[in-house]
Amino acid sequence: MKKIIVKLKENSYPILISENSLSSLINKLNSQEISKCLIIIDRNVEKYHSSYLRKNFAGLNCKSYKYLFNATELNKNLKQCYNIFKFLSSHYFDRNSSIVSVGGGITGDIAGFTASTFMRGISYYQVPTTLLSMVDSSVGGKTGVNFDNRKNFIGTFYQPKGVFINSMFLDSLPQREVVSGIGEIFKYSFLSDYKNYSRLKKNLESIMNKKEINYKDIIEPCLKIKSNIVSQDEKEIIGLRKILNLGHTFAHAFEVQSNYKLKHGEAVIGGVFCSLFLSEELGYISTDKLREFINDYKFITINKRLKNLDEERIYQSMMSDKKNLSGKIKFVILEDIGKIVVDVLADKLLILNSIKRMKKLV
């Protein structure tokens, strides 16, 4: 078992990576003397793992309910939250009840948001089942729903009580979902140091070539990087946590303009490449350094849908990004591996040129 602690001023919590992680969750819930538990499950996860989930959650001492959720970006909205609130209310959940999210990032986002707002906040736990949610979205306490064609426009900072990871769920993951997870790992390779860069790059190449790989060797370093950042800047007050948004200003606009036909991680892959090009356009990295990074990651597949998106519309979507201030688009830029600059402004022409250069890689 691997254990990482997200150390916060208040409400620190564990991340457990283990084949018995679900048993650990059940023991944790039973020790909390919870009155009722709502288990929000992605329908696809239920399809492949229903017997495993049923067997484990049968060990709960409290009354539990299963809520199946169709986890798509178009369903990540206030209407779906209303449906969950209605379910909680009609089954007389109280402030001593809890929510467990079993699914990927979309399920985790909507479960976390409803938990944070129902009766001003009840406890919730994350059981991530996709590569992307295991390496990134299940940790850090960002919750949110899409609104008015804007990504994660309504949300909260609300930390889970624990994250319980079992890489067994990845065995049933479609290849496209694996590639989506690669997007966030690609991002993490630039955030720490050259040792992690080389380690993650090597493992990503193995995933892309469908070689056998121990996913724990990828999940653990990503979560150590993220938990360290979140521990220092839980709510993006000092700015450190903003480095986790590398490539995301581009990526969120890509998702919106594709009408969410692009998965988040697929959009992040394009977004990180755009950020590398913009870093060179702005003079933060040399052309030689850019060429080195592009060559290192030439094995990563960029979704062809990105090539057909209109640059002007992408730019307009970026103007609506929630991270903007006074109508100005802010970017996370690379100076070197482990050296990240946040809140960087760029001219429209440079932004559009970065998108065009990324498209040439498709």
Image (cartoon, helix red, strand yellow):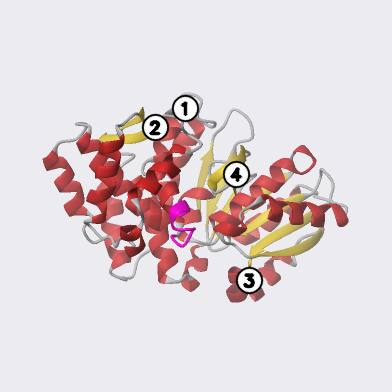
User: Are discs 3 and 1 less than 8 Å apart at CB?
Assistant: no
- Does residue 337 appear anywhere in the picture? no
Residue ID for mark 3: 46
- Of callouts 3 and 1, which one flags the residue occurring earlier in the amino acid sequence? 3
Residue ID for mark 2: 330
Is 281 on the left or on the right of 208, as rendered? left
User: Are discs 1 and 2 less than 8 Å apart at CB?
Assistant: yes
Say which of marks 3 and 1 sits in front.
Answer: 1
Q: Is residue 313 above or below residue 59?
A: above
Residue ID for mark 1: 325
Q: Position of residue 309 (x, y in %)?
A: 36, 56
Q: Secondary structure at mark 3?
A: helix
Q: Is residue 182 magenta?
A: no
- Of callouts 2 and 4, which one flags the residue occurring earlier in the amino acid sequence? 4
Residue at x-position 35% and y-position 66%: 213
Number of other residues with Cα within 10 Å of mark 4, as a class: few under 14, some 14 to 19, many 20 or more? many
Number of other residues with Cα within 10 Å of mark 3, as a class: few under 14, some 14 to 19, many 20 or more? some
